[in-house]
Amino acid sequence: MLELLHVNPSSGEPIYRQLTEQIIHLIVGGQLPTDTVLPSVRQIAAHLSVNPMTVSRAIQQLVDQGWLERRRGQATRVAANTPKTTASPEALLAPQLADVLANARQLGLSLSQLQVLLAAQWQQLDSDEK
Amino acid sequence: MEQDALLELRDITKQFDGKTVLNGLSLTLYPGMVVGLLGANGAGKSTLMRVALGIVAADSGNVRILNESPMALSAKTKATIGYVAQQPFGYEGFSVAQALSLHRSFYPNWDQALEQDWLQRFDLDGKTAVQKLSIGQRQSLALIMAMAYRPKLLLLDEPVASLDPVARRRFMADLFDLALESGSAVLFSSHITSDLERVASHVALMKNGELMLMRELDELREQLRIVTLGHDSLPELPSSVSVLAHKGRTLLIDGYQGEVIADAQSCLPLNLEQLFMELHP
């Protein structure tokens, strides 16, 4: 699963948070089914060339939140009962939506104008896929 | 932190020819820290390291390195400190293997397997004469010489500038191993902010001989924001927020906790390069 993980250290966003968000998305999106064994902290850190403490922090946070589980002496796995409340599409999209809204307001768009733009993009994507 | 500091600088001041190079600087390093030292040329980064090591004496202030005074280091303690200066380095007339052999004799904890491993990785041939090495190769050799005995404290002055990206990344992985497995602390200066973003647990930012910031990197990313204001005047700010720089409609703030900033048209996180640029207008 290492190839599924990417970080951008220069984005200004904490690396541990980039990692937790990605892993949650992978779990919710089904790429990481229940019981998938995660690579070790060392392997992830070496693959991404980031500080292992950062990776360890991300994994710990996911264990605390119930996304991953770690039984004594065993590798970390995707938990059987992942937290459904935070896993809703709404919750996962919220940060990006907030960014879009902030930008739209800065540009002086109204809600209806934004909705028009969104619908246009949606249709564009639909026709691109056909 | 409960552990003992590996390096402690208190209120260090240093002048050269009447020019202040370090101005009341304090910095403490604990085990496990990988501190990226960032600052413009002439900000005092090299002098800070030289003062820490006792190569030059501070005019005032107090230095403790591995619980000893840098001006009276015991041989035993010296053998647990690693340092790579900006300009290496002697050993002219030696081959790489001869230079390493001499160097090795000073360090009882030298790890021969590690040395061989790194020689191979950096593609250094023991038979090559030291003066025939390229700058990047010399830097690699200097790193091997400073790290093969797994020092408790490692000071690196622009150690990777001449290494290619692949060698840099591998070298950084070694830094982690050292810091985390051996409980060592690393202080390294670099202008390559993208490296610092990956490696550093903490960032120390120097300007004009003073320490402007010394913070955990993730904390810095969460609490620093660059704000574009609607007007030139400074709006009323939340009490947790402090101003690092304010020029025209651009505002750099610290201590941000997700509050609403009045008159802000945008409020964005920034990376180290942006931070550096904003602090050096």
Image (tube, coloured by chain):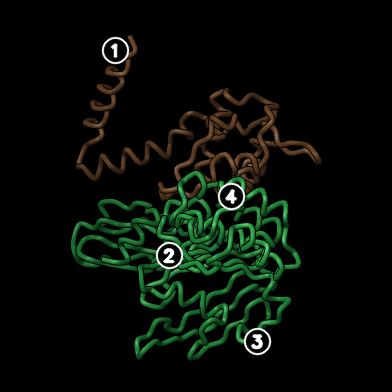
Chain colours: A brown, B green
Dividing the picture into quarters, in which one does residue B250 lie? bottom left
Element class at badge 4: loop
Q: Report x, y in % for residue B181.
A: 70, 56
* Mark pair 1, 4: CA separation: 59 Å
Residue placed under numbered mark 4 in the picture: B125
**Residue with the most extreme right position:** A73
Indicate the amino acid at tag 4: Asp
Tell me which chain the residue with mark 4 is part of: B
Q: Residue at x 31, y 61 (%)?
A: B277
Q: Report x, y in % for residue B54.
A: 56, 82
Image quadrant containing the N terminus of chain B:
bottom right
Question: Label for residue B72?
Answer: 3
Tag in front: 3 or 1: 3
Tag in front: 2 or 1: 2
Q: Residue at x 61, y 83 (%)?
A: B70
Disc 4 residue crowd, few under 14, some 14–19, many 20+, Cα 10 Å? few
Seen in the picture, residue B246 relative to A111 is either above or below; the reply is below
Say whether marks 3 and 2 touch (CB < 8 Å). Answer: no
Tag in front: 3 or 2: 3
Residue placed under numbered mark 2 in the picture: B38
Residue placed under numbered mark 1 in the picture: A127
Circles 2 and 4 on the same chain:
yes
Circles 3 and 1 on the same chain:
no
